[in-house]
């Protein structure tokens, strides 16, 4: 009986810790998504109004995007460029009036897609254990 109680308490603690860990990951993902959409919207506005990319973003590359994102980081989105750089996969596209980025991060265990046209993230897909990871092209095309 004593062993059953100890086993029950152990399982309860394990489940509680697992739940807390998933909540923490979920919060990290939510914060990342908010920071990414905000940073991209601000950067797009600045690039369209001033400097080299004024009125045409089509020549913007992923490397230059990361550099500009880093240079224009604010307190609220500090570290976003580094988080994108460290992502396991990325897909960046630019057109005349906007740019978009899709990333897969093992750390966040999710795919995130953002088009800088809106102040909101376009798509987020948490990856479940054992789930096959779709290609970013496939994910963006949906």
Image (cartoon, rainbow, N blue to C red):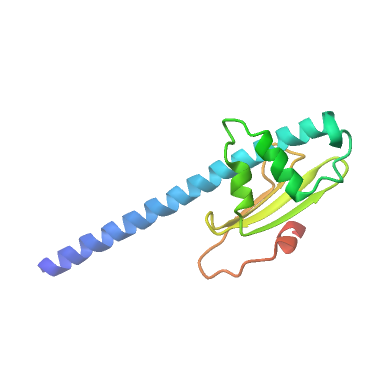
Hey, which residue is sitting farthest left in the picture? 2
* The quarter of the displayed image where residue 118 is located: top right
The residue at 87%/45% (across/down) is 58
**Percent coordinates x, y for residue 75 in the rendering:** 57, 30
**Percent coordinates x, y for residue 138 in the rendering:** 73, 63
The residue at 61%/59% (across/down) is 88
The residue at 85%/35% (across/down) is 52
| Position of residue 60 in the picture relative to residue 38 (left or right) | right
* The quarter of the displayed image where residue 22 is located: bottom left
| Position of residue 59 in the picture relative to residue 13 (left or right) | right
The residue at 74%/44% (across/down) is 65
Callout count: 0
**Percent coordinates x, y for residue 132 in the rendering:** 60, 70
Camera-side residue: 51 or 133?
51
| Position of residue 47 in the picture relative to residue 34 (left or right) | right
- Image quarter (top left, top right, bottom left or bottom right) of the C terminus: bottom right
Q: Is residue 11 above or below residue 39?
A: below
- Image quarter (top left, top right, bottom left or bottom right) of the N terminus: bottom left
**Percent coordinates x, y for residue 91 in the rendering:** 73, 56
């Amino acid at each position: 009986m004593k062993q059953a109680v100890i086993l029950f308490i152990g399982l309860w603690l394990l489940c509680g810790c697992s739940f807390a860990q998933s909540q923490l990951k979920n919060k990290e993902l939510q914060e990342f998504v908010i920071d990414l959409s905000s940073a991209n919207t601000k950067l797009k506005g600045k690039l369209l109004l001033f400097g080299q990319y004024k009125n045409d973003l089509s020549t913007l590359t992923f490397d230059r995007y990361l550099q500009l994102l880093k240079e224009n980081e604010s307190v609220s989105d500090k570290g976003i460029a580094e988080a994108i750089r460290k992502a396991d996969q990325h897909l960046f596209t630019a057109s005349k009036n906007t740019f978009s980025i899709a990333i897969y991060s093992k750390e966040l265990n999710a795919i995130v897609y953002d088009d800088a046209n809106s102040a909101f993230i376009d798509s987020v897909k948490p990856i479940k254990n054992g789930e096959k990871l779709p290609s970013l092209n496939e994910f963006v095309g949906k």
